[in-house]
Amino acid sequence: MTRFALACVSALLLALPAFAQEPEEKPAPPREAPLHMVSELAETLGRAHAVRTLCNGDQDGYWRNYMLTMMSYEGGGSRRAALTSAFNRGYQGQRRETPSCNDSSSGAEARIAARGKELADAIARSYMD
């Protein structure tokens, strides 16, 4: 009987690893684009918003809506505060440079928007690296 008991215990010990569960892998934390890139984009959106609202009025939220969408993906805590500050800095800086809507305003907005697209593309590529 002792041999039988030893054989059963041995069989159980050998089968134990088969019952062991795989350790759960923790999901990787979400990636974030480098803050300096996202801040520059936020500032660029602020600049575009300034030009657009000069010509179309404060109710035009075209570029602000882009900013809000970006912040829903990128903004949390101190990061959100940094992006808000960058947007406001861009807005105020552009208002000093362009105090009123004029013939060159649409061209200025287009140039700012092109820079924003470059930044957005670079940020998207940073997620793929």
Image (cartoon, grey):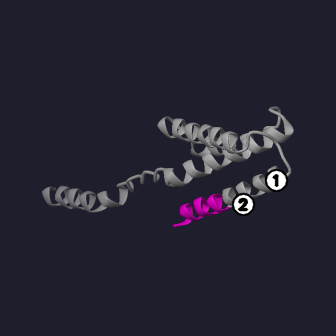
Q: Disc 2 on helix, strand or loop?
A: helix
- Determine which residue is flagged by label 1: 104
Q: Say the numbered circle drawn on residue 68.
A: none
Residue 27: percent from the left, percent from the top? 47, 52
- Of residue 24 and residue 102, the one placed in the foreground of this image is 102
Write the start and end of the magenta stretch as one range: 118-129
Residue 45: percent from the left, percent from the top? 68, 47
Residue 107: percent from the left, percent from the top? 80, 56
Identify which residue is drawn at 61% across, 51% down: 41
Identify which residue is drawn at 54% across, 55% down: 37
Task: Left or right? Give the position of 53 relative to 35.
Answer: right
- Of residue 106 and residue 31, the one placed in the foreground of this image is 106
Task: Kindly indicate whether the residue at mark 1 contacts the one at mark 2 (C-beta within 8 angstroms).
Answer: no
Mark count: 2
To which quarter of the image does residue 90 belong? top right
To which quarter of the image does residue 115 belong? bottom right
| Distance from the alpha carbon under mark 2 to that under mark 1 | 15 Å
Mark 2 and mark 1 lie on one chain; the one further toward the N terminus is: 1
- Determine which residue is flagged by label 2: 114
Q: Disc 1 on helix, strand or loop?
A: loop
Q: Of the residues tagged 2 and 1, which is closer to the observer?
A: 1
